[in-house]
Amino acid sequence: MVRKQLEISLLVSLTCLLLFPSIFTVRANTSTRTSSTTTTLQTSDHQVLDYKIQDQRGDQEEGGGHKDLEDEEEEINPYVFEYDRDFVSRVKTEHGRVDVLQQFTKNSNLLSALANYRVEILEVNPLTFITPAHIDADFVLFVVKGRGAITVIHEEIKRETSNLECGDIFRVHADTTFYMVNRDEYEKLYVAKILFPVNLPGNYEAFYGAGGGDSESFFEAFSWDLVEAALNTERGRLEKIFKQQQGKIMNATKQQIEALSQDEEGVRGSNGAWPFPSNVPGSPFNLFKKGAIKSNNYGDLYEADPRDFKPLEYLNLIVSFANITQGSMAGPFHSKAAKIFIVVEGEGYFEMACPHHSTSSGSSSPTYQNISSHLRRGTIFIAPASYPVAIVASNNSTLKLLCFEVNAQANIRYTLAGKGNVIDAMHIEAKELAFGVAGIEVEQIFRNQMDCFFFPGPSTRQQRQGSRADT
């Protein structure tokens, strides 16, 4: 009986193999891909990224189309984000918009250290009003261009208004109601924000009491009976004020803007010109009034840390701004803080040394990949903590970059070239042993560049060498 059952089972298996061979082929392919995926779990994050690209390519080839692997790698650069590709509009009217960058971890887990940070860009027309709201995130704003004003309502129902100008840094606590205006008659207002959500990691929401446009007031989420009782007002009147259709960003008269730019308690402006820190609650700090911490013919670097602006301490944040003269470069350098660079003007490129581990060589020592990208207005790129990075301005324009430096407590910017570089500070014996040549030769090389932090860029240096050769 048992023998007969075995014969029947074998016959069924052979029949299936003859009639449905594709089933076994698909299973074999699936098994192969599963094996590949299992291998990647034992490698670094960088290797995982490469294998993910390969899997995507394989799936496309099976479907009848494919791309070259190098093209795929160029498309998936987890360190670079573009304004026209990676931002979505949270608010958009004819008078302005609020755009938010996708989460840093959307494309890769390489930036998991930034998972709870978000970046927002505000752009509004002259003489506009941004309706009141509170959000479940702390944030720091930087005025990139223009003149604005912000009003915050504090815990004691105390209203404070601060005028804002280019270079101002301002902090707003989570759950604090605020509203803003562009007080300039002719110029747009551009503001960049870094946000620290307090409810869901990497996610935040704005709560609008007035509603407006295609969105409702949070009051409308409650039953009308409850709202009528709370405000002691009939529903008809309530619906009228909660249904305004102008949107969250709207035009205002010059007189209204002037009134919104001050209050009876007096208007605050940016304080704390260096070396006197701005520790007055509710006051902005102007980065440019402090003056550059590094400056020469090739660029200027401005920086505000908690010693300058106390509210940055709680958020463990440094705000910096670099002007790199056309044809010049900054770095290479590295620091403990992870750096979120936002290009606000000009063009250029950056290069970064990125560690890459490979199990195929049998060594645990990393090799270093050159991560690079073209930079233009609206590009955001990330330099993780300790990754050496250099930034180069094009020959046609000065490159201006805003930088939010996170996890910045006790941060030091270590330069790898130029005056005061970290290699030059080493013992001469350490230089000799590490580089395998005479220590004096290492010193000569790392002392050839006499400038500090900002230098002539590659093309400028080549032009100068060509001019010397001609003479």
Image (cartoon, rainbow, N blue to C red):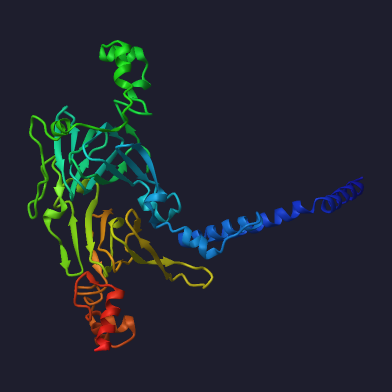
Of residues 423 and 172, the one nearer the viewer is 172
State the residue at coordinates (18%, 34%). 151
- Residue 91: x %, y % from top left: 34, 37
Residue 44 makes an appearance in the image? no
State the residue at coordinates (32%, 30%). 247
Most extreme residue toward the front is 186
Q: Quadrant of residue 439?
A: bottom left
- Residue 430: x %, y % from top left: 27, 80
**Left of 445 or right of it: where is 215?**
right
- Residue 413: x %, y % from top left: 23, 64
Residue 34 lies, with reference to residue 414, above or below; the image says: above
**Left of 287 or right of it: where is 275?**
left
State the residue at coordinates (23%, 38%). 173
Q: Quadrant of residue 395?
A: bottom left
Q: Quadrant of the N terminus?
A: top right
Of residues 294 and 429, the one nearer the viewer is 294
Of residues 56 and 423, the one nearer the viewer is 56
- Residue 85: x %, y % from top left: 42, 50
State the residue at coordinates (31%, 83%). 433
Residue 441 lies, with reference to residue 370, above or below; the image says: below
Task: Give the number of marks.
Answer: 0
Q: Quadrant of the C terminus?
A: bottom left
Residue 16 makes an appearance in the image? yes
Q: Quadrant of residue 324?
A: bottom left
Residue 289 lies, with reference to residue 425, above or below; the image says: above
